[in-house]
Image (spheres, grey):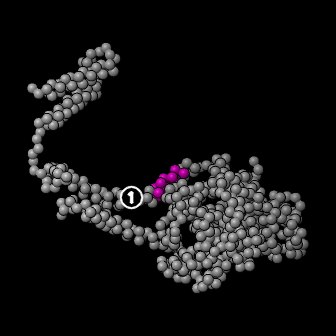
Amino acid sequence: MNKIYLWGVIVTAIMLAATGYTLIETAGGKKDLSEVLSGDIVNTLAVAGAVALVIITVFVVLKYVRQMQVDSADGELAEESWDDIGEYYNPIPTGWAIMYLVTMVWGMWYFVVGYPVNSYSQIGEYNEDVAVHNAKFEKKYASITGDRLVEMGESVFLTECKVCHGLAADGVDGKAADLNVRLAVTTVKDVIMNGSNNSLLGSENPMPNRDGIMNANKDYAPITDAEIDTVSAYVANGMSGEGADVFAGACAVCHGEDGKGMEYVAPNIATYDQTLIVNVLNHGKKGSIGTMPAFDRLNTKQKEAVSAYIISLSKGE
Amino acid sequence: MFHWLEKHPFFFALSVFVVIAYAGLIEIVPSFAQASRPLVGTTPYSTLELAGRQVYIKNSCNACHSQLVRPFKSETDRYGHYSMSGEYAYDRPFLWGSKRTGPDLMRVGNYRTTDWHENHMKDPAAVVPGSIMPKYPWLYDNEVDLETAYAEQLTVAQFFSVPYNKEIPMKDGTTKVIKMGDSIAESNALALEEARIIVADMKDQNIKDAVASGKIPEIVAIIAYMNSLK
């Protein structure tokens, strides 16, 4: 008997013994092997697997060691020879070749007709993501109100609006509108001087410039420079202080006694309201300070939230 | 034949190259040709915008600002619609950028305005607290190089058939014509006409005076370019 087989038997015995020892150790060290195996079919299967692995390993190693010992070159040589190193002509196993070709054909089908080229697109994935997100957003924030709406508005403000209006919404030294107050003196004055197209309210009738503003309390005399200064200060001061009589005479006919405006006719100039803010977000604005671009890519809820935040700012706390 | 190729490495390498190059050609060229056509509504740059684009490149704005909105919700929420290849049809060279130290500028014309840019380039930190963007005061002094912009227009019109002075279809079904001058004088006049519209929205009296006297500071050109990015 070849010595190699003896070694095979010895190695198998050692490895099986080691497997048994490990089993008993992990099971607590005191039970014998039959007790370990009686508990659970999983243990039995694992042990069977380990034993099979040991035997297969030894068998395969033995086969190749044996082949190295006794094998001699035979078979048909391919015609090429590279630096005198030849190559046997080994026909490809038929079953393997068929599987190889079938896989290739399937691969082409899968890539071209199946998923990637035919059905996948980056934009499609994007559209799906957006649809899922929007549905989640709608569901989560459908009934959000009060403080939470203001909080949402603040977070949108800090992302989109603070770049121009500033962290504190104060307009960064007059570079944008100060949102803590409804109107600044210069803005009111500018509008009275130059009029306004009023298109944010969807109205055909623009506000006239100073030549078209008459004071009803003074027999419809055109508004004077002094009156413009007074009434601008009055409006900017939150509709209080000096100038109430000029406002009542010249402005109240459209903006209302309390300055809260009239639907389709004149905007609310006493306080911010949601209609006004959503209009500005949708269409942008060109005022005395500069041009504000439209932010119509915010969704309806976000616009509502921004309005709530801005309204909360101008009311103080 | 394959046995012969295996014995001749040079010809083997050559046939590998031919096979891969052929595959590349039929795979890449058709989709490239289609994707690089201008989108409906994409117009070439006017003289002033092109001059502004050169100011943008000269000041390495593209080192910190990308011009490529990727199709992710977080990006489209912030910057607007994702970029499409046809939108870059008239960009030579493209300014996609590879790093965003500052925000993407692909569609900055939609959400920033002339007066904002005017304040911002003078002192970014005064407009956006905490901004690390440096000041660009020289834009307000240097005069823009309109001749180079005109030369570029002539070149692209001649060699790449960029449709200047032709009707370009827009999204709403109308057409738009981007004018290019027949001479340097005419081109400068066109640019000045465009600059007047921009400075009407600006506050800086020096800039207004400069444009009124026929000079165009770089800031006006770069604002024209920024406003054209939509």
| Chain of the residue under the numbered disc 1 shown in the image | A
> Label 1 sits on what residue type?
Tyr
Residue sitting farthest toward the bottom: B182
Determine if the magenta segment contains residue A134.
Answer: yes
Where B120 sits versus A72, above or below?
A: below
Residue interval drawn in magenta: A126-137
Given residues A12 and A233, the one toward you in this image is: A12
Give me the residue at 25% from left, 60% from top: B9
Tell me residue A197's x, y (percent): 71, 72
Residue sitting farthest toward the front: A83
Tell me residue A17's x, y (percent): 24, 21
Tell me residue B62's x, y (percent): 57, 62
Residue B181 image-quadrant placement: bottom right
Residue B225 falls left or right of residue A52? right
SS at mark 1 in the image? loop
What residue did someone put label 1 on? A120
Residue A212 falls left or right of residue B52? right
Give me the residue at 82% from left, 76% from top: A211
Determine if the magenta segment contains residue B125.
Answer: no
